[in-house]
């Protein structure tokens, strides 16, 4: 019966500087003190400029844009669910923000031209977003989109409230 000692330590790493072996969990070489480099720690800190220049994926862009429209639907439901029926006329809300805008919105609804311009603006924004590849550009245009959507909802509420008063 042999009693081989079980105190072997298989997890040793070799110093790249002096060749001495140190325990795997050592941060520095036991012999010369040279620091062991961690394989799993690349410099993950990015400067804001580097972050803004990072690519943005189509999936991320899709989530953000869907989120913005989801908020529009939720806001409309919170105001009055029946307002969802006026969804095709949604961009007319932007017109209602101008002085005397409520009547302009009504004229816009009849002629249809401001409606095309309004949806055209949204179409242009989506087209621009689909073309952006950097985070910085995407979030800038996305903020503009959110601001326009918020103004649009405010205008819609204004003109629909005015319409409710007339009836
Ligand atoms: Zn060493």
Image: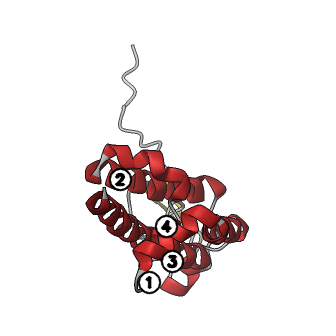
Q: Residues within 10 Å of mark 1 (few under 14, many from 20)?
A: few
The one nearer the camera, 86 or 119, is 86
Q: Nearer the viewer, mark 1 or mark 3?
A: 1
Cα distance in 3D space between marks 4 and 2: 19 Å
Find out whether the residues at labels 1 and 3 contact each other: C-beta distance under 8 Å. Answer: no
Query: Looking at the image, what colour scheme do you see?
Result: secondary structure
Tell me: 144 left or right of 120: left
Q: Residues within 10 Å of mark 2 (few under 14, many from 20)?
A: some
The first of marks 4 and 3 along the sequence is 4
The first of marks 4 and 1 along the sequence is 1
User: Which type of secondary structure does the marked residue at label 3 adopt?
Assistant: helix
Identify the image quadrant of the N terminus: top left
Q: Nearer the viewer, mark 1 or mark 2?
A: 1
User: Which type of secondary structure does the marked residue at label 1 adopt?
Assistant: loop
Provide residue 126's location: percent of width, then percent of height: 65, 65
Q: Residue furthest top?
A: 1
- Res. 44 in view: no
Provide residue 41's location: percent of width, then percent of height: 49, 65
The first of marks 1 and 2 along the sequence is 2
Cα distance in 3D space between marks 4 and 3: 26 Å
Report the residue marked by disc 3: 144
Report the residue marked by disc 1: 98
Cα distance in 3D space between marks 1 and 3: 18 Å
Q: Residues within 10 Å of mark 3 (few under 14, many from 20)?
A: few
Q: Nearer the viewer, mark 4 or mark 1?
A: 4
Provide residue 145's location: percent of width, then percent of height: 52, 71
As drawn, the label of residue 76 is 2
The one nearer the camera, 13 or 20, is 13
Residue 54 in which image quadrant: bottom right
Report the residue marked by disc 4: 106
Vertical relation: 98 (above or below) 13: below
């Amino acid at each position: 019966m042999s009693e081989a000692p079980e105190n072997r330590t298989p997890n040793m790493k070799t110093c790249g500087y002096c060749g001495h072996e140190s325990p795997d969990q050592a941060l520095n070489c036991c012999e010369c003190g040279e620091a062991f480099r961690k394989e799993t720690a690349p410099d993950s800190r990015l400067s804001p400029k580097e972050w803004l220049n990072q690519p943005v994926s189509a999936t991320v862009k899709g989530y953000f844009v869907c989120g913005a429209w989801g908020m529009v639907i939720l806001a409309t439901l919170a105001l009055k669910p029946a307002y969802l029926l006026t969804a095709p006329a949604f961009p007319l809300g932007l017109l209602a923000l101008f002085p005397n805008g409520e009547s302009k919105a009504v004229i816009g609804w009849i002629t249809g031209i401001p409606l095309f311009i309004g949806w055209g603006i949204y179409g242009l924004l989506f087209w621009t977003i689909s073309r952006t590849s950097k985070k910085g550009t995407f979030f800038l245009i996305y903020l503009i989109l959110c601001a326009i959507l918020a103004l649009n909802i405010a205008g819609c509420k204004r003109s629909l409230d005015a319409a409710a008063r007339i009836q």
